[in-house]
Image (cartoon, helix red, strand yellow):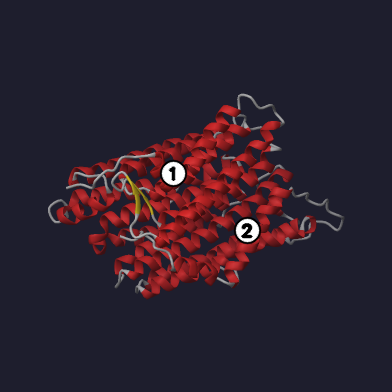
């Protein structure tokens, strides 16, 4: 007997999906307002988007508070959509990333002619798609969220209509993304065929029951979904689209893809793949182990030769995806269910640090490359002379990505390596450590240029807008703060009711 599906009311939807409702309504409102606003008034549109995201964030926090006092999990339509701390903490990461993206975009849109309203509401819709991916407990709604995020992202990547690189990036992203979508959907169809349901919780029990008789079909479904999600997170061998797309996209959108879109894919990966196939994880976890190792190696080694800063950050992003795969991969050797929650804490901590660091770095990249009218890493030469604050901030962000002590990135990597060692995946921990050492080479290459004195003359100062300074300042405070006091976030994560209270 399936779950009882209660009648939907606005109140029930608002209680569970209030944040999503606010963002969708704001997106459609901006779509209509675009017809009536003049050029000057449209400058306020990104600020309206930021306001809606702040309100949505408040509603997510409200839900997290309510979960702590609830006796059972909040859900809609027979657990089609759920309200748990797992979804809520990822939603907060998406919202923060989107707010910072819009703050970077305000400065970017003042110098690049793009439709501000269209840009803003597409970004809001993409954020809603990510949020749906995090809180869905049904393959159909997860797929809808994935498509909403993907379609909005395709358009955002290609919004610079006067740029051949942007058009090429959008086309490659669209084609590869469509293949990923098809693979994911086909893998999901096998789950429905084998279990007769699209509900993840029910399908999990069904998969365990049919594994012995239909092992090939179950593994085929797993491989297809891994490939589809792997495209989204830039996992090797599905990473080839990433450098070209990151290079051609508007810089704030590159930051969004690198941080928010990747975080959404990891939320989907943990919720779908690990849940559905957890009953026999010891039979397939080596697939993830190998993919994690290859992703770390390829990302870091390929980044060494890059001269375009956005392509370098693209390969860095691929390497970061490899690090984030490690906590999931090592669960195949986990001795206790508590290791699942430990892995979740590791992923969320590292993702939170990575999103803030990425946004701070791309805020500086956006300014420096525009000022130099070049995306070559040489555009960072002598940055310290022109803006000591930006040079020092960028150095801290790069050191955090590399895993230098007293930064959030160091503690995040330390937690992941410790988790791998605890689960006796020693060689995977060794690869993570070794590839992190490689990353110091190309990150230090950028730092060397920034502090290199180009001439003996007086260099023109680099003017920073208020919004970019705000993004850099927030990212800097969190990066150092979580590096010095990581327990501030770890204590919060340790108290979460990850999957609600049954």
Mark 2 touches mark 1? (CB < 8 Å): no
Q: Is residue 215 left or right of residue 479?
A: left
The spot of residue 423 in percent (x, y) is 35, 73
Q: Is residue 334 above or below residue 149?
A: below
**Which of the labelled discs sits on residue 475, or is there none?**
2
For residue 314, say whether it is visible: no
Of residues 83 and 90, the one drawn nearer to the viewer in this rendering: 83
Residue in the picture at 72% in, 31% down: 40
Q: Is residue 339 above or below residue 143?
A: below
Q: Is residue 185 above or below residue 363?
A: above
Q: Which label's residue is closer to the chain start, 2 or 1?
A: 1
Q: Is residue 280 left or right of residue 266?
A: left
Of residues 39 and 360, the one drawn nearer to the viewer in this rendering: 39
Residue in the picture at 54% in, 58% down: 354
Give the secondary structure at mark 1: helix
Outermost residue, right side = 457
The spot of residue 116 in percent (x, y) is 63, 34
For residue 88, say whether it is visible: yes
Give the secondary structure at mark 2: helix
Q: Is residue 342 above or below residue 47?
A: below
Residue in the picture at 29% in, 43% down: 6
Q: Residues within 10 Å of mark 1 (few under 14, many from 20)?
A: some
Residue in the picture at 41% in, 48% down: 16
Q: Is residue 205 left or right of residue 110?
A: left
Q: CA distance from mark 2 to mark 1?
A: 32 Å
Q: Quadrant of the C terminus?
A: bottom left
Of circles 2 and 1, the one toward us is: 1
Q: Residues within 10 Å of mark 2 (few under 14, many from 20)?
A: many
- Number of labels in the image equals 2
The spot of residue 21 in percent (x, y) is 47, 41
Residue occupied by mark 1: 14
Outermost residue, top side = 35
């Amino acid at each position: 007997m399936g779950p009882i599906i209660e009648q939907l009311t606005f109140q029930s939807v608002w209680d569970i999906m209030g944040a999503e409702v606010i963002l969708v309504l704001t997106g459609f409102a901006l779509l209509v307002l675009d017809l009536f606003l003049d050029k000057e008034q449209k400058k306020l549109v990104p600020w309206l988007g930021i306001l809606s995201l702040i309100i949505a964030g408040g509603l997510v926090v409200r839900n997290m508070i309510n979960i702590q006092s609830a006796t059972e999990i909040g859900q809609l339509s027979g657990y089609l959509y759920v309200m748990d701390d797992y979804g809520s903490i990822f939603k907060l990461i998406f919202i923060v990333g989107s707010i910072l993206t819009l703050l970077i975009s305000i400065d970017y849109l003042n110098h690049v002619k793009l439709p501000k309203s269209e840009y803003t509401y597409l970004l809001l819709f993409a954020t809603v798609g990510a949020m749906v991916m995090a809180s869905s407990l049904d393959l159909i709604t997860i797929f809808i969220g994935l498509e909403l995020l993907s379609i909005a992202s395709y358009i955002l990547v290609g919004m610079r209509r006067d740029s051949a690189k942007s058009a090429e990036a959008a086309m490659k992203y669209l084609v590869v993304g469509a293949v990923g979508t098809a693979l994911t959907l086909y893998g999901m169809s096998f789950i429905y065929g084998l279990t007769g349901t699209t509900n993840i919780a029910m399908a999990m029990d069904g998969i365990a029951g049919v594994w012995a008789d239909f092992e090939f079909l179950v593994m085929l479904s797993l491989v297809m979904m891994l490939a589809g999600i792997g495209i989204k997170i830039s996992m090797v061998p599905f990473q080839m689209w990433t450098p070209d797309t990151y290079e051609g996209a508007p810089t704030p959108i590159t930051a969004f893809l690198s941080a928010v879109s990747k975080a959404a894919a990891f939320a989907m990966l943990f919720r779908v793949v690990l849940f559905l196939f957890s009953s026999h994880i010891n039979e397939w976890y080596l697939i993830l182990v190998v993919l994690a190792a290859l992703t770390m190696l390829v990302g870091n080694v390929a980044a060494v030769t890059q001269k375009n800063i956005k392509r370098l950050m693209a390969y860095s992003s691929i390497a970061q995806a490899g690090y984030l795969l490690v906590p999931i991969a090592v669960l195949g050797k986990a001795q206790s269910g508590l290791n699942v929650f430990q892995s979740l804490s590791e992923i969320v901590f590292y993702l939170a640090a990575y999103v803030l660091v990425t946004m701070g770095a791309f805020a500086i990249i956006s300014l420096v490359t525009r000022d130099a009218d070049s995306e070559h890493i040489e555009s960072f030469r002598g940055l310290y002379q022109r803006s000591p604050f930006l040079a020092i901030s960028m150095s801290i962000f790069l050191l955090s990505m590399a895993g230098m002590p007293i930064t959030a990135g160091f503690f995040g990597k330390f937690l992941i390596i410790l988790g791998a060692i605890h689960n006796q995946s020693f060689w995977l921990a060794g690869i993570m450590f070794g590839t992190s050492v490689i990353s110091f080479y190309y990150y230090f290459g950028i730092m060397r240029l920034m502090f290199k004195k180009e001439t003996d003359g007086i260099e023109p100062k680099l003017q920073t807008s208020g919004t970019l300074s705000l993004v850099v300042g927030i990212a800097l405070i969190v990066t150092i703060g979580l590096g010095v006091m990581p327990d501030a976030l770890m204590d919060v994560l340790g108290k979460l009711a990850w999957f609600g209270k049954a």
